[in-house]
Amino acid sequence: MPQITTSDFTFRGESRGEAEPARAGRFRTAHGEVLTPAFMPVGTQGTVKGITPVQLGDIAPQVVLGNTYHLGLRPGDALIARLGGLHRFMGWDGPILTDSGGFQVFSLADLRKMNEEGVTFQSHIDGSPQFLSPERSMEIQRNLGSDIVMALDECPPGQLERPKLEISMARTTRWLGRSRAVPLQPHQGLFAINQGGTHLDLRRRHLAEALELDAKTPFQGFAVGGLSVGEPKVEMNAVLAEFVKELPQDRPRYLMGVGTPEDLLFGIEHGVDLFDCVLPSREARHGRILTGRGRLNLKNARHREADLPLDPDCGCYTCRTFSRAYLHHLLRCGELLGFTLNTIHNLSYTVGLTRAARQALLENRFPAFAQTTRAGWMTEEP
């Protein structure tokens, strides 16, 4: 991917018309232009699990994620900085987004204590005490040298009582101001994270608080966090349908941790630009395959002699080269190659879905594309 020496996170819309609020657009980072909508594979520990950077390059995602919590613990952000930053360390020259560590605050609840200053937690590696504050999160991400930096937030569980949620949300606002005050590398852009659960009024209140800070020093993007964390899907979708369009029009909009094909399509319909999720690669390791004709369970015995690709409509390396019978065999034997080939396909399908949605938006045929795509998923297991 060609290098770009300057960053400009201003969102430039390219689609108009019947698909509104769905939108296609672009923004620029120091490591490449990002064409949206886009799905971003998760590379938690400096690698997208199961595949090489060359294989990832063939899939051609717009952005790859790294994890502040994990990389800060091991091998350590200072070491990565000494070795030239995360791009060089992991052999990836495209844009990188690093999360703030806020989701680990949620997922490692049994190992942490939180107060106004930050989060004290036990390392999941050796049990040693660690501390993550907004300032430390920014320091780690500055050392990693990612293009998109996420402000530290508190990610509450989906069913948290409203009074506790309001306390959590207020803390995230205060942490946002502290994150904003920490200088980053010149090429880095800071995204604010919106919280508020499934309460639309709290989402709006939290956005208003972020916009007060934005008026003084603009954020480079806005993210919606705290969804797909245990709340009913119907409630999540109801919030997204009303709220996403209220985020600033001129900055990228990022829906965090949401990545089923159904969720991607719904998010795009309502104006989301960026998505990330571990689901495609995690499902691949368990033999659960995403296709344009619905989900396929590769463990099923009926695939033992199936001399056809995972998805006849997919042009990825796995589908061009191997039969379901071979992939079923690898899965049953626990061969690592099976995990790799399944991951190549699932990520190719997911990245390809957002790429196809973008093309449909540019050609002003997105509603028909969405309808046809959903109809394909309604079939029995392919």
Image: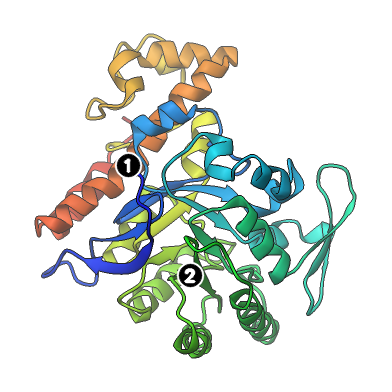
What residue is at 30 percent from the left and 19 percent from the top?
309
- Location of the N terminus by quadrant is top left
- Assign a secondary structure to mark 2: strand
User: What number is the disc on residue 224?
Assistant: 2
Residue 50 at x, y = what percent?
54, 28
- Look at mark 1 in the image and give the residue it sits on: 2
User: In the figure, is residue 205 to the left or right of 143?
Assistant: left
Q: Quadrant of residue 100?
A: bottom right
Q: Quadrant of residue 380?
A: top left
Q: The residue under label 2 is which amino acid type?
A: Val
Residue 338 at x, y = what percent?
50, 19
Residue 140 at x, y = what percent?
67, 57
- Location of the C terminus by quadrant is top left
Work out whether 288 lies above or below 120. Answer: above
User: What number is the disc on residue 263?
Assistant: none
Q: The residue under label 1 is which amino acid type?
A: Pro
Work out whether 143 lies above or below 196. Answer: above
